Image (cartoon, grey):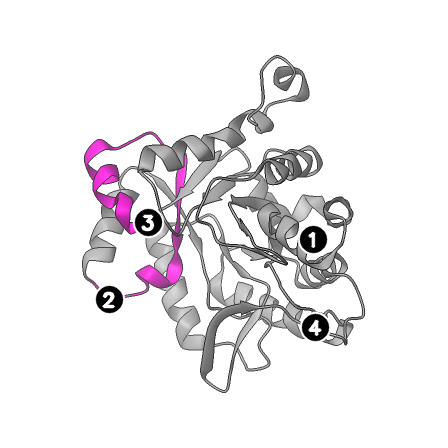
Amino acid sequence: MSLKALQEHASLGIGIGLRVPHYRHILEKKPICDWFEIISENFMVDGGRPLEVLESILEQYQVVQHGVSMYLGNADPLDLDHLRKLKALAKRTRTPWLSDHLCWGSVNGRFSHDLLPMPYTMSVAKHTASKIRQAQDFLEVPLLVENVSSYAEFSQNEMTEWDFLAEVVERADCGILLDVNNIYVSSQNHGFDSLDYLKSLPHHRVGQIHVAGHTRLDHVILDTHDQPVSDPVWSLYEKAVNLCGPVPTLLEWDDRIPSFDEVQAEALKARPYQLSEADRSSIKLPS
């Protein structure tokens, strides 16, 4: 992967997930937005309304693709039919990079439709990195892998999640989509220090950041994407930007979706954190 290709888009700014409830507003009002992130699988079709909307969006906005079913940690071989469709869509959108999750989710053609954490072992890291290299070579677009939120751990773990992520991306020579909400959720569920996670990563490989809301239950935090970003996540985001630089940032809001204006206002709370420290000191950061 060319890290230079990611660095060329470091100033892309603040993005919003393209979601069905906002289609009409975006097409009619044409709001100012740095870029939209699409779920790749929603547009890997031969025709119909999704592609019609996408073509209209592409006329005015930068689009970045994010996937949910490559399952790079599966024991099974890569799904070449899926990769062909993904590559065709990437050519249509001219996405500067593709992303998917560092997880597994299917066995022998049976799909869980979930983003399942992997055992953090060296053998799994080598296996996953090899598959990422294969996928990236086939797609001919830089690939970022995202850390997932988790609610259980494997007893076979040989390393921490952050050491595993670093091992995989260095071996695969790929980028990181750093989800700071997922870091926070998992740190609360498993009792680790989120700052240890952030500080231990290869920061030069972080090409994009996700922020999102979560739901706190009695004994667990769920990554629900159905409410505003919490203060602890904004604080973690600020530390991530200090370490990684002002990389493109995306607000995820996927359930109980409010108006476009409300989602955009929440996304733009990230903007002040991307300013220089001197400029930041002269304004009041979101709280």
Q: Is residue 200 left or right of residue 143?
A: right
- Name the residue carrying label 3: 19
Query: Which tag is nearer the camera, tag 1 or tag 3?
Result: 1
Q: In the rendered structure, which disc, 3 or 4, sits on the residue that comes first in sequence?
A: 3
Q: In the rendered structure, which disc, 1 or 3, sits on the residue that comes first in sequence?
A: 3
Residue 51 at what x, y percent from top left?
Answer: 24, 56
Q: In the rendered structure, which disc, 3 or 2, sits on the residue that comes first in sequence?
A: 3
Task: Give, as a three-letter code, the residue at label 1.
Answer: Ser
Say the numbered circle drawn on residue 187.
Answer: 1
Residue drawn at x 31%, y 38% as measured from the top left: 259
Query: Which tag is nearer the camera, tag 3 or tag 2?
Result: 3
- Name the residue carrying label 2: 46
Task: Give, as a three-letter code, the residue at label 3.
Answer: Arg
Quadrant (top left, top right, bottom left, bottom right) of the N terminus: bottom right
Quarter-of-image position of residue 169: bottom right
- Name the residue carrying label 4: 119
Q: Are marks 4 and 2 in contact (CB under 8 Å)?
A: no
Task: Give, as a three-letter code, the residue at label 4.
Answer: Pro
Query: Which tag is nearer the camera, tag 4 or tag 2?
Result: 4
Residue drawn at x 33%, y 49% as measured from the top left: 19
Asked which secondary structure carries label 3, the reply is loop
Asked which secondary structure carries label 1, the reply is helix
Q: From mark 4 to mark 2, how far is it between C-alphas?
A: 37 Å
Q: Are marks 3 and 4 in contact (CB under 8 Å)?
A: no
